[in-house]
Amino acid sequence: MSHPVLEVRDLAISFAHPRPAVRSVSVTVDEGEVVALVGESGSGKSMTARAVIGLLPDGAVATGSVRLRGEEVLGLPEEEILRYRGRRVAMVFQEPQTALNPVRTVGWQLAEALRAHGGARGRAARERAVELLREVEIPDPEERLDFYPHQLSGGQKQRVVLALALANEPELLLADEPTTALDVTVQAEILALLRRIRDRTGTSIVIITHNMGVVAHLADRVVVLRQGEVVEEADTRALFARPRHPYTRQLLAAVPRLPEVDDRVLELLAEPEPEGVAHEMATPALEYDDVHVHFGSRTRGRVLPAVDGVTLRLETGQVLGLVGESGSGKTTLGRLAAGLVPLAGGRVRVAGTDITQARGRRRAALCRRLAFVHQDPEASLDPRFTVGEAIREPLDVHGVGTRRARDQRVVELLDAVRLPASFARRRPRELSGGQRQRVALARALTLEPRLLIADEPTSALDVSVQAEVLELFADLQRRLGFACIVISHDLAVVNAVADRVAVLRAGRVVESGPAARVFGDPAHEYTRRLLDAVPVPDPTVRDATGPALREHIAS
Amino acid sequence: MSESLIDVAAPEGAAPRPDDEPDQRRRPGARSALRRGKGLAGVLLIGVVVALGLLAPLLAPYGPTEQIPGANLVGPSGAHWLGTDEVNRDVYSRTLYGIRTDLVVVFLAVPIGAVIGILVGLVSSWWTFTDVIAQRVFDLVLAFPTLILAIALTAFVGPGLRTVFFVIIAVELPVFGRLTRTSVRTVREMPYVEAAHVVGAGSWWQLRRHVLPNSWEPLLVQLAVSMSVAVFIEGAMSFLGLGVRPPHPSLGSLIRDGVRNMYDAPFFAVGPLALVVALVLGLLLVSQALAEARRS
């Protein structure tokens, strides 16, 4: 037992590509320890985990050493790996949706995991499955055994995935971004659950994440990876208190934070809200008036309300943040303003024009005043267009100016989003994620819109890139003065750019007001819960919030 | 048309740009796929057949319908490389001219059918009403086996090259219509099409600038497949006497003549058969190479 549970020494993984995926990684995980592998995309954190469990993609060449309790497992033949994979080391994947077989019941899948390693069968397997579901705190485990994955919520699915991983009582649990696909409140529950599982069973956990908040919440020790190398390794508290490597400092600084309740907020609260008289005269940039949106069709049966009686106003030059968890209707509201979703009731006015009434020339005029930034810049730029063509397209569509003038405008816009003019000739594929989102932003600004709708503009980006893009965005907004809707599930992102915030839940506005007020002193219980659930990138807060989270789950 | 298809599929941009970042991996385009391995072999095979057909007037020692006195069903010799047929015509010359018929069918009828099919597919996929109508018509046409369709059409317009033309267009039109519809439906859901819509671009703009260029690749593969099928259709129709009227030669009718005289002159059908095989094989190799380039 003197050996650590996992010992990775000088692991290097390379492909045919000249740059190796992992250059040199050494990590040690002790009994019952939670170690976080942190890094941005391309840092090699997932590859390291895959090497441990023997799931490297074809063509990968791994050198170095990976020892499980002193036994070398790197380079073992597949049959040998099968004996320990799932039994001694288990993996929890990022996307619970795809990690479960949709045509089998939860019970069947758990039984399969047990059977694979010669565990319990028949009645005994069923009992063990119930036990496992109880362990991951799923209510009514006996009933849930006969559920299919689609009958469970996202959080419950991830719990089942966790139960599958725990089926054979592994010594080591590898969790690859286990909460990234989940809502904040669910994420908080899963993180708390992981900690409790560790406390109860003594399983060592390696958690792979890019979220510093998750790290602070869960990990005992942190290993920071960058471009396939360990740049810093430290105890969690020490790392957050005194980051030594500049990259770690940069990572920590890039995390957007929520406001603390301090004097500034209280001062703000004392002031009367600047609504009313002054703005009543001016036409708002965007107005939702008792808006309803339904999905599904009446003729085919079920109608699902996605937006249920929302009334909101966005004044000229203001930034409104829409926050909420999945299914809250925030994205639908944004798409509604761009005319991408049919309206079931109420009115949406962009600068006084009813968007459902606009046809032909009036629609064209409306489109010129309005721009939309998609979540995923990779998909929202035509792969066949060069960056210049993509940015110029709005001008081409509306036939603005001469060709030369348009190209000149492209250069200006690239400059505005801090990209060199030479980028105009590149294709989206040749850009990084952050650069692509800048291009998408430049394209949105081409026609000098009065209203910009940004749907999760940074959720596809790494933290450090996210911070840059947000800063650029805020800067452009200040300079150009367009009104803006920022839609995000990330409260901190919204806090970084929005003047006002509307919190949505199940298609209704739960609370709205100035950002500092809503985040600093939430009036609604749901807003408070959302805020509490955000993993704060500060390990000292962990002990304070831990019990509070448990109460939420109980309620 | 086939030429411009290839142009669109392999966009410019191969020129080296010195200021580029590390990630410069270009996906192997349609063009480079045809420059190596299978693709190259296919292009060479097609090239040889096409060259033989185009250069027929220079290469052929006799005219396609010229009768040579005293040479009745003679075997291959220095004077008649592939021998002569039962009415004293030089098979080698006839074969070379016969290629031309097939080239017309392959490089004219198929692209025409493809273009009409693509247009119908585009229009139909964009609006529900047209979609329902077009798809049911396609169902109807596709329900008939090709040869039955050919025989039925011949009953109306009589045999001839024109009929072969019509049959190929009728057969290929729904194939391309369907395929266009499928790939357009996939592409139009992409956020970049929506992005164009938000900017204010109309349906036509979205179709022309975004949807069509991003739907080319499967169509290009299908074009090569359909061309090889067209060679078969021509061969089968001429073999059955529904196609090119004698004395005009085509590869299909030459094979039929050869089979008829198989016992007296077994060498007769070899030349045209070899050419059909070369052409079909070449086209299939090209289509495979294109499909592989698309997947990678």
Image: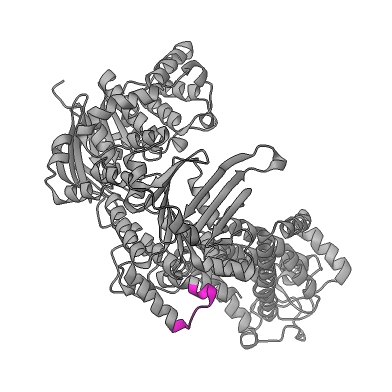
Q: Where residue A156 sits in the image (x, y, percent)?
A: 44, 28
Judge whether residue A162 can be spotted in this image. yes
Q: Is residue A448 above or below residue A150?
A: below
Q: What kind of secondary structure does the magenta stretch mostly adopt?
A: helix
Name the image quarter holding residue A472.
bottom left
Instruction: Name the image colouring.
Output: one colour
Establish if A500 lies above or below B12: above
- Whether residue A396 is in magenta: the answer is yes
In the rendered picture of this protein, how many numbered marks are placed on residues?
A: 0
Q: Looking at this view, is A36 or B182 the one in front?
A: A36
Q: Nearer the viewer, residue A394 or A163?
A: A394
Q: Is residue A232 left or right of residue A536?
A: left
- The answer to whether residue A88 is visible is no
Figure check: A82 above or below A146: below
**Per the image, is A144 magenta?**
no
Hey, which residue is sitting farthest right in the picture? Answer: B156
Q: Residue at x 50, y 21 (%)?
A: A144
The quarter of the picture where the C terminus of chain A appears is: top left
The image shows residue A499 at horizontal and vertical percentages of 37, 53
**Residue at coordinates 53% horizontally, 56% vertically from top-left?**
A337
Q: Is residue A220 left or right of residue A407?
A: left
Query: Magenta residues, as a range?
Result: A395-404
Q: Please say if A460 is above or below B88.
A: above
Image quarter where the N terminus of chain A lies is top left
The image shows residue A376 at horizontal and vertical percentages of 43, 54
Q: Where residue A30 sits: x, y (%)?
A: 18, 27
Which residue is pictured at 79% across the width and 56% down the height? B140
